[in-house]
Image: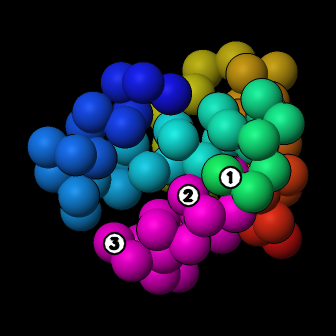
Amino acid sequence: MRLARIAIRLRCDYAGAHRVLTSATGMAGLIETAVAALEELRRPQPNISLAWIANQVPIQHDADRERYLEGFRRAGLG
């Protein structure tokens, strides 16, 4: 989470860092923070969806992809 926050501070429009922060905070159970991170992610990537993430974010292992997606679900992305 720390590195994602640093990346966002350096480049606020970097969607990848917003995605990492959203999923990580969701999985950590920091739901209010995850919801806020998702809201911020929607600025550089307004049409973000679970389907887009599953198809476009290069995660090699299915189990890792599912954990990543679960963080977004916990943040409220449907």
Counting residues from the N terminus, which is met first, the one under dot 2 or under dot 3?
2
Distance in Å between CA atoms under marks 1 and 2: 5 Å
x and y percentages locating residue 75 in the rendered image: 77, 57
Of discs 2 and 3, which sits in the foreground? 2
Quadrant assignment, res 59: top right
Name which residue type carries label 2: Ala
Decide if residue 63 is on the left or right side of residue 33.
right
Q: Above or below — where is 11 with respect to 70?
A: below
Residue plotted at (68% across, 52% down): 34
Label 1 amino acid?
A: Ala
Secondary element at image label 3: loop
Task: Identify the residue position indicated by label 1 in the image.
Answer: 34
Please say if 16 is above or below 60.
below
Give the quarter of the image for residue 39: bottom right
| Residue at 66% across, 52% down | 33
Residue 67 in the image, given as x and y percentages of width and height: 80, 30
Report the residue at 77% width, 41% height from top: 30
**Residue for badge 3:** 44
Q: Which residues are magenta?
A: 34-50
Residue type for callout 3: Pro
Q: CA distance from mark 3 to mark 1?
A: 16 Å
Query: Residue 73, percent across and down?
Result: 83, 55
Task: Please tell me whether mark 2 sits on a helix, a strand or a loop.
Answer: helix
Q: Is residue 37 found inside the magenta-colored segment of the image?
A: yes
Quarter holding the C terminus is: bottom right
Residue topped by disc 2:
37
Query: Circle 1: is it few (<14), some (14-19), or many (20+) Cα within 10 Å?
Result: many
